[in-house]
Image: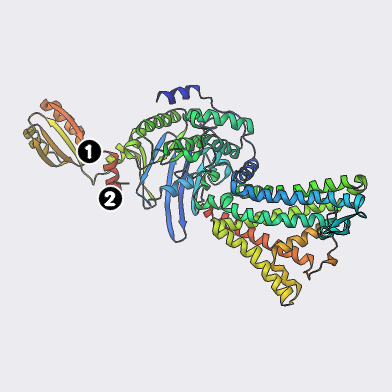
Amino acid sequence: MTPDPNPQSPDPLLLFDAASKWYGPVLGLNQVTLELRGGITGLVGANGAGKSTLIRLATGQIRPTLGRVSVRGLDAWDWRARRLVGYCPDVDNFYEDQSGREFVHTMARLSGFGRHDATRRTDALLERVDMSDRADRKLRGYSKGMRQRIKLAQALLTEPALLVLDEPLAGIDPVGRQELLELFRALASQGTGLLVSSHELEELEKLTNHVAVMARGRIAAVGTLQQIRDRLNDYPMSVRIEVAGAKQVAKTLLDSDDVTAVRLESATAIVVTATHPQRFFAAFGELVIAESLDVRSLEPLDDSAHAILGYVLGGSGKT
Amino acid sequence: MNEVSDSLLRYRSWRGTLQSPVWGSWAMARLSVAQMARRKLFWGLYALALMIFFFFFYGQYLVVWIQLQTAQQTVLFGGVPVKVGELTKFLDRLNLNGSAQTFANFIWFQGYIVMIVLALAGAVLVGNDFQYGSLPYYLGKPIARRHYILGKFLGVGLFVNILTTLPALILFVQAGLLYDWEVYYVDHLRQLIGIFGYGLFLTTALSLLLVASAVLVRRTVPLIMLWSGVFVLCRTLANLLVDGARLDGAWRLIDLWNNLYLAGLWCLGADLGDMKREQPEVWQAIAVIASVCLLCLVYLRKRVQAVEVIS
């Protein structure tokens, strides 16, 4: 089994087709249409935005009330679809008196591996997540990071085409994070599609800049951070520019239609607020050439994931 | 980071065919039995179950030995000469003679242990999956909801049979060896089938009831209270109504364990006419068991269909 048995399939890896989910009177997911074809996609949003519902639908844990969710054309609810999906939940409630190896082995048997295959597969994956030497300890003695690795190992058992990770970096130390990020990138490079839900925006930015932003049960925005930022015309971008003759440059920039404000920080630094960032950067580039400006640095102040999320979600960006 | 990169280089992807999800159910069943075996608290109860088995095992042997060797001999008991056969009269009540009553009585006594263990273990086996949210690990795997239910059902069933049907079969084999085995095994074929039948009744009813009640209440203490209500309170009430208030024997139908016993006796081909206490008809008892099973199935199906198995 390869990560994706049919990578050339015209069916998307994951497709939400106008999917809605009601929990009694509460609407968990509202008419979501989303298509993933591979790579790493970050899933971000405030608590209660619908991330967990979306993940549960994608992994076939629950069924949409309306619409359809499919994995490579198979209904996500169908157990066959789950051979293509690896799921690493955010909860880590295992049978605590099992060892890590026993747990992964049990999950392998549950996935349909024969005894010998399950043993071989368990060993291979424990090595892959760097847990071979600690796998025979009881789960109750595991740290948060070790639990995350074990969860990841069980999610990779069937060589899934789509790996869904719910808060995979929570509680892991910086070194461990770096190792896991490296592993995620390696998996993506081998053809596994990753859907990563995380509150750790800085870490998520290191992993991918393709995100789906959720708010109130809907997909508020999807694309690269830059694409999303460019569409936020209602939110002017702030850019800090270090340039010789800052006062004169400020005066020139104020004549531009896209510049709404310029603040002089010092004799060599200004903060420009501009609408239509792309148009502003193009115009500023021409100005630098035409006036032979001595630009020492140019630093967008609010195109971080935090800032963009803040704009999209209409809040602080805190997720 | 280097370690991960190294392991990635060494990593061999898997190529093969996965088995049917029914094997996943079997894996869950084995896990359930392993979980029961790991709890040290339960080993006291298992020891008790083993004692009951040994009591019947050596009891059968003792009865045959007394009958053949020493029944007419006398021993001094408190200075008074008493026939050995008289001393072992109390064993007659248990029918330790390889008859249908022998196996029915054995399973009846083992049933107490089974019920106590299941009441204690229900939360571990099923309730915790719902209570602490470990269900996504199961349902994230390529199995359907029915395979999950089947796995839990098999797990409980396996445990019930290890404590009841399996030792009853050993007693059957032993009884055949104590008497004329060629004649015994042929003449008592009905009992052999009956042991399996009784086991099937127990397995189906107790497994469904445990899974359904554990899904409903999830935690150990409420589960124990629920099972005490079903198997102790209802039984006491049935005795009070039928034996105390002299109401119709049909009132004993509220005693599920008694219904299972009656169904077991029917399977074993025992004579139900010589029962000392007033009892309902066997078909009524079986109808009640079937109704309880049906109710459990409907409830579980409803939970699965509503999908909020994961709450």
Q: Nearer the viewer, residue A300 or A116?
A: A116
Label 1 environment density (alpha carbons within 10 Å; few <14, some 14–19, many ≥20): many
Badge 1 and badge 2 in a common chain: yes
Q: Is residue B160 visible?
A: no
Q: Whole-percent x and y of residue A38?
A: 44, 34
A213 or B134: nearer the eye?
A: B134
Residue under the point 75% across and 50% down: B53
Q: Out of B16 and B27, give the one closest to the viewer.
A: B27
Q: Secondary structure at mark 2?
A: loop
Q: Where in the figure is residue B5, as x and y percent of width and height? A: 43, 24
Q: What residue is rendered at 73% in x and 56% in y?
A: B109
Q: Helix, strand or loop at disc 1?
A: helix
Q: Is residue A61 left or right of residue B174?
A: left
Q: Which mark is residue B229?
A: none
Amino acid on which the number 2 mark rests in the picture: Gly
Q: CA distance from mark 1 to mark 2?
A: 19 Å
Residue A284 position (above or below residue B159): above
Q: Which residue is mark 2?
A: A314
Which mark's residue is nearer the viewer, 1 or 2?
Answer: 2
Of the 4 image quadrants, the one containing the N terminus of chain B is top left
Query: Within 10 angstroms of label 2, few (less than 14), some, or many (20 or more) residues?
Result: few
The residue under label 1 is which amino acid type? Pro
User: Residue A18: x and y, percent?
Assistant: 45, 50
**Residue B195 percent across, percent down from the top left:** 79, 52
Residue B192 left/right relative to A164:
right
Q: Is residue A131 visible?
A: yes
Name which quarter of the figure residue A300 lies in. top left
Q: Chain of mark 1?
A: A
Give the answer, above or below, for where A25 lies relative to B70: below
Residue annotated with mark 1? A277
